[in-house]
Amino acid sequence: MKTAIVRHILVKDIEIAKQLKEKLARGGDFAKLAKQHSTCNSAKRGGELGEVKKGQLVPIIDKLVFSAPEKVVQGPVKSKFGYHLVEVKFRMDF
């Protein structure tokens, strides 16, 4: 079974997502930015979604999580919820 340790930042506006990605690229603290800007409940945990199994997330994010390189912020990716910045911290295949 495929699982991954994931964190993300969810915002409503693509311009904010782009600005946050730029801050992350310059060394910004993911957890701090998630707490300040993310509209997801995971914001209070610094964007941590914890361990997720393949199929648990919305399809576009699920596909990204299980194909993107580890420890590289991906996005912004649009879903019905808004714009996501996603980082796969660790992926496991059992």
Image (cartoon, helix red, strand yellow):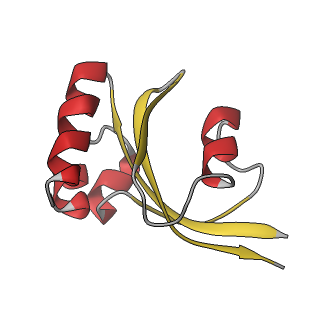
Q: Quadrant of residue 28?
A: bottom left
Does residue 90 lie above or below 25 as drawn? below
Tell me which residue sits at (24%, 62%) in the image.
31
> How many tags in the picture?
0
Task: Check the picture and name the quadrant holding the C terminus.
Answer: bottom right
Query: Quadrant location of residue 76?
Result: top left
Identity of the residue drawn at 59% across and 53% down:
68
The image position of residue 50, as x and y in percent, is: 52, 68
Looking at this view, name the residue that lies furthest to the bottom. 94
Q: Name the image quarter holding residue 26.
A: bottom left
Percent x, y of residue 17: 28, 32
Q: Nearer the viewer, residue 47 or 87?
A: 87
- Look at 71% across and 50% down and name the residue there: 56
Is 78 left, or right, of 22 in this rendering?
right
**Residue 4 or residue 48, whichever sits in front:** 4
Q: Quadrant of the N terminus?
A: bottom right
**Residue 4 spot, x, y in % from top left:** 63, 67
What x and y, as percent, mark residue 27? 15, 61
User: Left or right: where does residue 82 sit relative to residue 36?
Assistant: right
Is residue 91 shown to the viewer in this render?
yes
Is 18 in front, or is 12?
Answer: 18
Q: Is residue 37 visible?
A: no
Rendered residue at 67%/45% (across/down)? 62
* Direction from residue 16 to residue 57 in the image, left or right: right
Q: Please say if 82 is above or below 34.
A: above
**Above or below for 90 versus 66:** below
